[in-house]
Image (cartoon, rainbow, N blue to C red):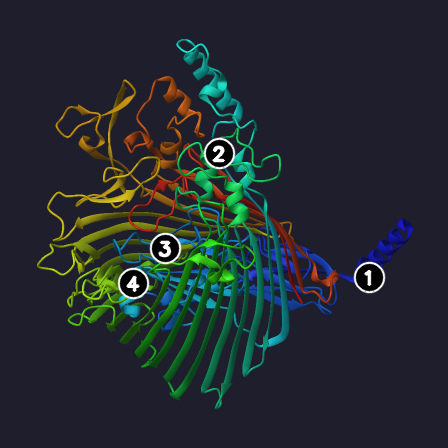
Amino acid sequence: MIKKLRLTLILIFIKVFIPGLLLAQVTITGSVIDSEDNSTLPGVTVLEKNTGIGSITDIDGKYSIAVPKDAILVFSFVGYKSQEIVVGTQTIINVVLEKQMELLDEVIVIGYGTQRKSDKTGAVAQIKAEEMNGGIITDAIQAIQGKSAGVLITKKGGDPNEGFSVRIRGASGFDSNTQPLYVVDGVPGVDPSTVAPEDIETFNILKDAASAAIYGSRGSNGVVIINTKRGSEGNFKVQLNMKVSADQVANKLDLLGASDIRNYAQGLLEEALITKPTYTIDSVFNDGGANTDWQDEIFRTGISQVYNLNFSGGSEKSNYYASITQSNWDGAMLGTSKKRTIGKVNLTQKGLNDRLTVSGSISGTFESNDYENYGGWGKDDILYQAFSRNPTDPIYNADGTYYEATRVFNYQNPVAIINEIDNTRDAQRFLGNLKADLEIFKGLTGSVNMAYTQDDHENYYFRPNGLIDNGYGRRSYNNTTQKLIEVTGNYVKQLNENHTVNALLGYSWQELNYEGFSVQARDAQSTYLASNNLQALIDLKYGDIDSWKGMWRLIGFFGRVQYNYQQKYHLSASVRRDGSSKFGENNRWGWFPTVAIGWDIHKESFMAISWIDQLKLRLSYGTSGNQEIGEYRSQLVFQNSGLTVDPESGNDVVTFVNPWNANPNLKWEETTEYNLGVDYAIFNSRINGSLEVYYKRTTDLIGLYSVPKPPNLSDRTYANSGELESYGIELFVQSFIYDRSNFKWKSMLNLSHNTTKILDLGEYFEDGSVRKEGWISGRGMVGEEYYVTGIMEGEELGSFYLPTYVTMLDGVFVYKSEAGGYTDKLSEAKRTIVGTAAPDLEIGWSNTFTLYRNWDLDINFRSMIGNDVYNATEMFFDNPDLPSLNASPTALDWEEKGRVTGSTVMDIYVEDGSFVRLDYLALGYNFSSKKIKPISNLKIYIAANNLITITGYSGIDPETSVNGVSFGIDQYNVYPKTRTFSFGINATF
């Protein structure tokens, strides 16, 4: 068998490699010069196409290379257009390279259109497919994490079922949704998690109001436009992308082990024996007899796989792209997983002598999720139970049943919870859109875009009897549909060689409808049918059946005019008139105008400097709105509140309450923004980028505020009140640092700083008052004192507002008091701002290296500097509830000092959360296509995500979610971040 294998390998080697060696070689010589001044170009790469054979020009621009006669030579140099030349009978090939302005001529996507990058007047960033993050990506938005200045993308932990939080240029509100608007292939409001990263061509991020306001009342948080891939004219092409990964918890919580608990218990016994000589170890501690690391029992190595197969091609009149992506992610915590299948088809057809273009897209997503509860401190919250559980407790009894012990309230076996509780979801999503573009006459194009989206979710939950009280089952269903119709007219006119005008008019109609129901019951008689047969649960109470239905509608009229003079002076102005059903009848309509100018300074005669390729100044002003609140917030609604007895009939009747008052004046939040930008490119665009400075103010903040009752029907009202401001600076630098045939280095660096401050809390707060946020509960912490974040006028959003710890007397914590002295009562403690969760500096640094022609290396770093973190995990677990519950090692120090005070909020738990993270590292090898036909391209690679984190933070991870107003809190019940190692293959046929 071994001999046959050897013979086979030898024959394969002869078949593949020997013919290439026997081909007739010819030596080609020549020189390469610049087309503008005929100067020689040293360092030009000369490669035989589709091979690793190559050379570079010397200091005089000359080269020499030996290749077969049928070879194609590719001449490339940074800042110049590449050329391909067939060798044939030639032995001397002299080449003239032309400078390229590709970086400036690239097309970027803006709202309802495109424009050349060199023509932009607003703050727009583009990330191409080849610049996206690699490795295992669970959400499309993860692909651009750290890739754009001013775009902060975070995720609480490593749960594959959890999404990402995105904040563009700071927060724009308190209680409204602060996530950006996502537009996928021209359809606004699409969930980016339904898009396979492998299908994405570009991300375009509209960061300033002048760019985003074309989307009116949904643009205040920025806009992320995702364009998926389409076919192109040429041969039929097949691509296969495969990845497999191993996922592990990057850092575990530092807790005591069983031996530490036993040593502590022995110390307690020795103290007790002084006064109670008959005591034994059982008198002070119930030793379970095991040595269990509960984190090891709930965490695992999760194996994930992603397979993507796509087809593309086209002709002069039509093109197509079709793909299917199958993803299976097993989380690093037992019981968590996600399976997703995405199918997509993009088609384009031209007709009427190319005056009509019809394009369409159909995509479907099928997803199954397995969940575990971990967000609280109840009996079924896995992380709290695993972290708290005594390590001397075993998992199982001798008979194989789960070991249970009632040490304290809410004490449960986490392995039993994972194995016995079912918590799943099935989801199906469908998106179809059809667009027709008709050239009515030269320069005028009319477009109609229609889209339909349907999203169906079904959730199941079942807990058998005997686990956490009695059994419980729940099943719910929710259906959401969304319809879109948009009509636009676009007119482009070149008046003469100096003047160009581009005018847009449009109408948009969008409606969302949703409905659903849920049923729940208790006391399961059988586990066989689980939540599929809820009538088998005999304890059904009032409120166990619920249903709902709702809708909202948005109508908009918009227009935009873009003008440039001599391709040097640029002007853009737009306006949108939006009407939303979410707001009060007095304020449903609003105006959102913008204006922006640009000046290409480098085109002026006084800036005729050869090494400056671009120097452009941009200035913009705009207003945008935010309508991302729930439906019916401006109307008087009633909700059932329970059952009561009719005093006349004696029958049960349903009672209703109104949760908030009607407010016909409720309107959208409005953001006004100024942006000053500079675009630059120097040394043949070898170094290029942009610098942005911005200031924005958001007024009429939407919130649910307390009001007196009476005269109001309810003590709560949705209203507009308050203001905040954000200002910052962003720098982007792209560098082609080194470019030779055997070594290339491309670097992309972005830095940003943002400050968001509260200017006015509004009429519903007294002057000098504090809006309390960041509530923490559990382990006896119940009440108004247990908050860590304070929102105050003149202060930064995300400020930690905490009591100052002074000392400990007789085991009781002592704080500074409001009266100027000291107190041991948290309610009397003086609070001050002791830090802020917002970073002083955000950094993203991506590097791509090409090594020895066939190897490539990607290294991406991400960093936050100057952000503080409230370590609530340490606050929970340094509480010496020993030996019943587990704790952190610092609990032993507190116990030795005689601590009596339980877990509480104070300033000593605020830490510097600055970090530098090696976010992505990948090494790939590209095979020569000549040796592996019919494969035209083949790449294999290994990669790692979240490989190294450098930080002084003592907790599990310094990076927390930025969603909402109380961010920067490291909670004990957050799914730990993971470290991923993956292997992948990309093949093109």
Query: What is the distance, in whole Å, between disc 1 and disc 4 at their CAs?
Result: 65 Å
Residue 503 is left or right of residue 915, and the answer is left
State the residue position of label 1.
19
Q: Nearer the viewer's eye, disc 1 or disc 2? A: 2
The disc placed on residue 268 is none
Residue 332 drawn at (x, y percent): 54, 45
Residue at position x 19%, y 44% from top?
792
The disc placed on residue 690 is 3
Query: What is the distance, in whole Å, between disc 2 and disc 4 at their CAs?
Result: 47 Å
Q: Nearer the viewer's eye, disc 1 or disc 4? A: 4
Residue at position x 26%, y 21% from top?
807
Q: Are marks 1 and 4 in contact (CB under 8 Å)?
A: no
Badge 4 marks a residue whose secondary structure is loop
Badge 2 marks a residue whose secondary structure is loop
Residue kind at label 3, given as amino acid type: Ser
Residue 978 is left or right of residue 191, and the answer is right
State the residue position of label 4.
628
Q: Nearer the viewer, residue 568 or 31?
A: 568
Which of the two discs, 1 and 2, labels the residue nearer the N terminus? 1
State the residue position of label 2.
405
Callout 3: 10 Å neighbours few (<14), some, many (20+)?
Answer: many
